[in-house]
Image: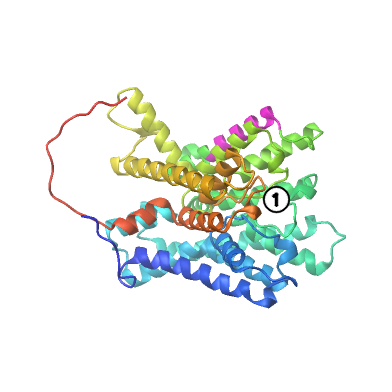
Amino acid sequence: MITIRKNIFKDPQTALLTNFAALIFIGFLLLMLPISHNGSKVSAIDALFTSTSAVCVTGLITVDTGAVWSVFGKLVIMVLIQLGGLGLMTYGALLFRITGSKLSYASSLSLQSTFFQQNYAAEFRSLFREIILITAAIESAGTVAMYFFLPPHETVGRRILSAMFHTISAFCNAGFSIYSDSLVSYRDNVPLMLLFMFLIVAGGIGYFTLIEILHRSGKKHFKVDKIRWSLNTRVVLLMSAILIVAGFAALFLVGLTAEETTTGQNIMGALFQSITARTAGFNTVHIDALPLAALIIIIMLMFIGGSPGSTAGGIKTTTIAVMLVHIKSGLKKQDDVNLLGRRLPNGVIRRATVVVFLAMMWNMIGVFILSITESTHETMFIDILFEQVSAFATVGLSTGVTSSLSFLGKLWIILSMYVGRLGALSVALWFVGEQRTRIRFPKEKVMIG
């Protein structure tokens, strides 16, 4: 029997989901204030959409961020992005402080799948301080560097606001920009683009990977063959590098838009889009002008996303790595699933399988719903698929259909961003609850394939 969770005060999973929803609601109220607008009034659905996109660090927008929102509104969005990026970490620390390190299996699974691995669960409270310090250090250094990389013709105040806003947005993999064309106008500013790519990658590989790298770098002999790196860090770094290089090569080969006229622009454009597609959401090329093959490549990168314990979304790099070696062992008819010299527990394989299945099902349902709600618009299937995956993976890239979405379409995208940020597995576990049984049925095979 399925048990629906009802006590939001005793169940940490429910507290996690409701607190995150409360942050979205507070952001919505603040963005509805006249002081948040730049003259013209913003509708309630657009304010809710923007608040959800900011808290879920997605970056999809229905109104122009730079033109519609005032300085106060931009500051609200910036704070929402920061709290959204650290929000799950904060709630996790508070939950561990309240409940101790002993959580139910379902609660632990939900929290682990959302932002950390099991190895770190018990010591999470002690690591939380390091997470805050790392975030502050990277964002402070990024803001200073970005201030000097921005065009000097802007006023000091606007450069400071722009540097702070875009640094937080990049490190939190949010993709919000106060420029109407995102970063297209700055694509030839190589130092600025390299800084954006560094911030995106740093925010996307995960806090615990960053912590381990910093801890290892403090040792006298910083050599991979002399240090026992955790399997999680090795998988994260390897898969991130593979996806960046493979994404760059694929995008460079299929080509970008007609606006990239030089080899340098094509190289930088392909590299930037390969990095930003895995949940950052900035763009240096016009997405709606990309060829179909490039859009498909970006959709695949968006679906995979970043790494566990990061501000990124998607099914995560570790999940796709587990699924690949699982498929390999299945084809070779091996009993064990091995990854980089380690045997994976069955529980990890089951979680990876469920995560991929739930993500695929949610996006298939989303495409179906959007194909109905947006039937009155001249929207192609690839645009709907791109928008759905971008929302679920909290990326923020769009072919340009976000602002023209119907009311119901916007509501669905809001829900997709929320579910995608928390993780479909976490939401599913909250809904069905935890069910233990000692009954084991007789074993029998079915035909597969």
Name above or below for residue 190 compared with residue 45: above
State the scheme by which the image is colored: rainbow
Which residue is found at the position 11% from the left and 37% from the top?
442
Name above or below for residue 377 compared with residue 265: below
The residue singled out by tag 1 in the image is 195
- Residue 161 x %, y %: 73, 66
Secondary structure of residue under mark 1: helix
In the displayed orientation, state which residue is furthest to the top.
332
Horizontally, is 217 left or right of 337 in the view?
Answer: right
Label 1: how many residues lie within 10 Å, few (<14), some (14-19) or many (20+)? some
Depth order, front residue of 335/231: 335
- Residue 90 x %, y %: 47, 66
Give the quarter of the image for residue 40: bottom right
Magenta highlight: main SS = helix
Which residue is found at the position 60% from the left and 48% from the top?
376
Depth order, front residue of 38/434: 38
* Count of numbered circles on the image: 1
